Image (tube, rainbow, N blue to C red):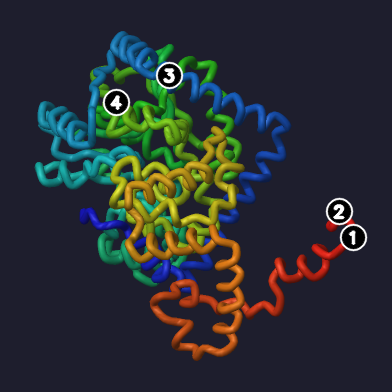
Amino acid sequence: MSNRPVNHARAAEHFLEDAPHLKFHDERLWDMRQKRDAQMHMLPEWQELREEASRIKEHTLARLPEYLEQFEENAKKNGIHVHWARDGAEHNRIVGDILKAHDARSLIKSKSMVTEECDMRPYLEKRGVSVTETDLGERIQQLDNQLPSHIVVPAVHKLTSDVARIFAKDYHTDPNIRDPHLLAEAQRQAARPVILHADAGMTGGNFVVAETGTFVVCTNEGNADLSATVPNLHIATIGIERLVPRMADLGVFIRLLSRSALGSPITQYTTHFRGPQDGGEMHVVLVDNGRSARLGMDDFWTSLKCIRCGACMNTCPVYRRSGGLSYGAVYSGPIGAIIDPTFNEHKYSTLPFASTLNGSCTNVCPVKIDIHEQLYKWRRVLVKHREMPFVKREIMHMAGKLMGQPRMYRAALRTTETSLESLPRFALYNWLNPWGKHRELPHPIKETFHDWYKKNRATAPENKK
């Protein structure tokens, strides 16, 4: 919980040293990207869907208070209790009070990034409530005491052997199991008794419909449906930006979500929750936690359009080769690098620099968030707010001065050429040259472009006129 800036480079370096995990992580995510592309090419209207999704989200965010109030009014008519949480602490208090009022000591929950964002699990466990993740990936991460490393597939960085080791410790299964199906069955056998005897269930919500006062949960394991329906008490924690105005708008996002996330036409379970089951009780907690403040940021408000598909992560060459845990935050990858600084600008100041700005994230985003442009804009903000490390800031300052003076820049190039040819290796490869830690410096050039142009073009007759 330190407030020190996340050292993404160092964490990524450790991930790069583990060749088997690196290879699997990179190939698995790229496979998801390729499947996404295949689905895209099957739909001639794909770009129209993206445009429409972006338009709906921008329209909704421009009228967010109006639609939130409409949802609350209609949800209450459906028998749903609606709560408002300004931040993570208030969210946790609300959930804790609901559980206390029902004397609930055990909570089962499906995957919810908002509860991770609010750090809810430790809060409840300190108050005597056992919290069990029912999503397979989230449960693996919970047992291993780690944050999710991906929005959609939380344990994507783990090999089968890693899961076998974790389950052997907690479920007393054979540590040598290498069959994923057997491991999934072990989780099922361990989870079912907990689900059947739970006092309360919790889900997130992928989409909230203002017109009907309902919300939709999209999953592939069915665990969310069990969490919501087996106990009589259902709590749904949802970020205020997950709103859409009408039921008719929902189809656009349902068609885009799973195709963008996993390359499948639709999730296995797309469940509409309209109200509490007979004899049960349903609560929806609408969480702000900095979203309203982000809505007022001219350059960064469109990040609230995100539908948490993870497509930007699957395509990002930096994320694929550094792992989600290296970001030190609930949200990793390109989308995390533009969201996380809105929560804590100092702590996550390094993340917008963990990018090549290649634009692939923007190209695959189903709601057309300009992710790579926001990464660049965040860099400018962080430099302005002096959140860049001193050494790097001074180097960039000197580089700016040098490049702003053509004669000095050309003289420096010639000096560099001489230095690269004559200086000993220890003078070139040291802590002042992080570039050289994993790669060789380029060979010195024999002739700069300026010199070549001066010799071959500047003296041409047509340039003398």
**Amino acid marked by disc 4:** Leu
Label 4: element kind: strand
The residue positioned 71% from the left and 67% from the top of the image is 449
Q: Is residue 142 above or below residue 283?
A: below
Q: CA distance from mark 1 to mark 3?
A: 70 Å
Q: Is residue 27 above or below residue 42?
A: below
Q: CA distance from mark 3 to mark 2?
A: 68 Å
Q: CA distance from mark 1 to mark 2?
A: 7 Å
Q: Earlier in the sequence, mark 1 or mark 3?
A: 3
Residue identifier under label 1? 461
Mark 1 and mark 2 in contact? Answer it, CB < 8 Å.
yes
Q: Position of residue 49 (x, y in %)?
A: 62, 28
Label placed on residue 209: 3
**Amino acid marked by disc 2:** Lys
Label 1: element kind: helix
Residue identifier under label 2? 465
The residue positioned 50% from the left and 50% from the top of the image is 313
Label placed on residue 286: 4
Mark 4 and mark 2 in contact? Answer it, CB < 8 Å.
no
The image quadrant of residue 196 is top left
